Amino acid sequence: MENYGCCTLSVVPVRSTPGHRGEMVNQLLFGDFFTILEKDNQWLRIRTLYDEYEGWLSEKQYTRVTNHSFVTDYIENQFYFTDLLSWVREDSCGKKRTPVVFGSVVRNVQEDRFELNGKRYCLEGMIKPVSLVPDREELIRTAMLFKGAPYLWGGRSFFGIDCSGLVQIVFKVNGIGLPRDAGQQALTGKTIHFLNEVLPGDLAFFDNEEGRIVHVGILLGPDRILHASGQVRKDVIDHQGIFRRDCGEYSHRLRIIKRIF
């Protein structure tokens, strides 16, 4: 069994336990690489290379990668798809097209073509290189593309996304790597003590009754936040937390504010 694998499908579930009944805790997007840790029947326990997140993947939903291909494909120049939905087409057969979602990654693009694990592809969609200097205005513009996307535990695409997945994918496309879960993300960055000191793109974290970080959102300013709760929505925030005007009550209790860049 190879040590590495790559996702060459649109969106693939990663589960907490081996089997289709296991809880979906994450998703792989096209171009995501991972290390294979073990095999259990037709399931693989993997660790993603981008954020070292572990889970179980059906062996029917990945492409084996040789060590040489891994080195050449993963390390080289990376580009992210910036349309909510794009396509890639295998050059060899022409008619085989795979839909790819925002944040999917391709590497070593020349004009509109790239190689992945020995296969040549043609891309149909907008891509951008990894940002070297993050820009707050661009980050907010990126985040707002997801407004209205349905909430999905473990999701990472416009067709279903969770709160920390939203934060991770938006920051990823803007050149900033973050962990997968809200509790992990809360350990990064610099603490901001007052809402009137925030800048667009700062992150707000929220806890439950036990004091555990369970939610995160992207601050648009000192009194507005974009977050995934039922759907990706824009709500009011104050020193207590997120206030839902549509139901006239607080939905999340503010714990900490972090500046990532």
Image: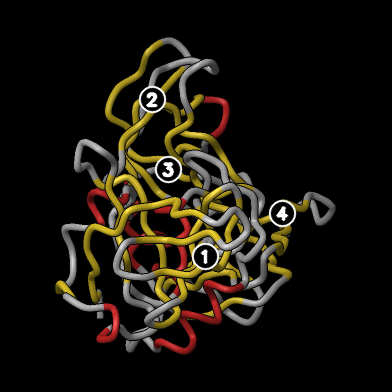
| Residue highlighted by disc 3 | 65
Q: For the residues carrying marks 4 and 2, which lies nearer the camera in this image? A: 2
For badge 2, the amino acid type reads Ser
Q: In the picture, residue 232 is in which quadrant?
A: bottom right
Disc 3, disc 1: CB below 8 Å?
no
* Disc 3 from disc 2: Cα separation: 23 Å
Alpha-carbon distance for marks 1 and 2? Answer: 27 Å
Crowdedness near tag 2: few (<14), some (14–19) or many (≥20) residues, C-alpha within 10 Å: some
Q: Earlier in the sequence, mark 3 or mark 1?
A: 3
Residue 254 is situated, as x and y percent measured from the top left of the image, at 29, 59
Q: Amino acid at mark 1?
A: Val
Which residue position is annotated with label 2? 16
User: Nearer the N terminus, badge 4 or badge 2?
Assistant: 2
Q: Using the numbered discs, state the Cα–Cα distance from disc 4 to disc 2 in whole angstroms.
A: 26 Å
Front label number (4 vs 3): 4
Q: Is residue 261 above or below residue 60?
A: below
Callout 3, which amino acid?
Val
Residue beneath disc 1: 106
Mark nearer the viewer, 3 or 2: 2
Quadrant, the C terminus: bottom left
Seen from the viewer's position, the closer of residues 105 and 244 is: 244
Mark closest to the chain's N terminus, 4 or 3: 3
